[in-house]
Image: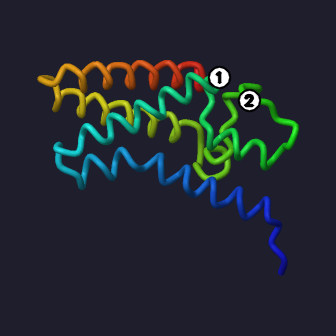
Amino acid sequence: MEINTNTLYLYLCQFFHIFLDMVPFIYILFFPSKYDPIIIILVFIQCLHWLLLKNECSLSYIEKQLLNKKYKLGQDIRYIPHEERWYPNKNMVILMHALQICVFIYILYRNINNTILVLLSLFNIFVMFYIFKIRYF
């Protein structure tokens, strides 16, 4: 059985994307708050790249390129290949992203006395709400 290289890359990319979807839940359950600055900065970079890439995640863009070589960045931000293939329905995806936002609100609350982390967290939460709104509603 021969496996198409594009298919292999697509599956690897999608599984990595699913793992990243789960990071907030893994983080909040298994890591103490002393690691909050790391997750806040990583999510800040993620949110910044969404905005710089026309509201599109770089992994989603790679997935779309593997499926359609003619795909242009920002052409269809509502289509997220790994969500469509691996999650049972759109309601589950919406619930997952809403819970991710709740996790980051909790992280914001844990760091309420640190101005820099609060500002970064507010930016992250705002961008997550913005992306959430334009993708799913």
Instruction: Tell me: 13 left or right of 6.
Output: left
Distance between the alpha carbons at the discs numbered 1 and 2: 7 Å
- Read off the residue under disc 2: 73
Quadrant assignment, res 75: top right
Instruction: Tell me: 68 left or right of 99.
Output: right
Q: Position of residue 109 (x, y in %)?
A: 18, 27
Residue lying farthest right?
Answer: 70
Mark 1 packing: few (<14 Cα in 10 Å), some, or many (20+)? few
Instruction: Tell me: 3 left or right of 120.
Output: right
In which quadrant is the C terminus drawn? top right
Q: In front: 107, or 84?
A: 107
In which quadrant is the N terminus drawn? bottom right
Q: In front: 113, or 76?
A: 113
Instruction: Tell me: 122 left or right of 115.
Output: right
13 up-or-down from 104: above or below:
below
Total residue callouts: 2
Q: In front: 117, or 27?
A: 117
Amino acid marked by disc 2: Leu
Amino acid marked by disc 1: Lys
Residue lying farthest bottom?
Answer: 1
Check whether the beta carbons of the residues at disc 1 and disc 2 lie within 8 A of each other.
yes
Mark 2 packing: few (<14 Cα in 10 Å), some, or many (20+)? some
- Read off the residue under disc 1: 54
Q: Position of residue 91 (x, y in %)?
A: 53, 36
Residue beneath the point at 67% across and 60% down: 11
Q: Position of residue 9 (x, y in %)?
A: 71, 59
Residue beneath the point at 80% across and 30% down: 72
Q: Position of residue 98 (x, y in %)?
A: 41, 31
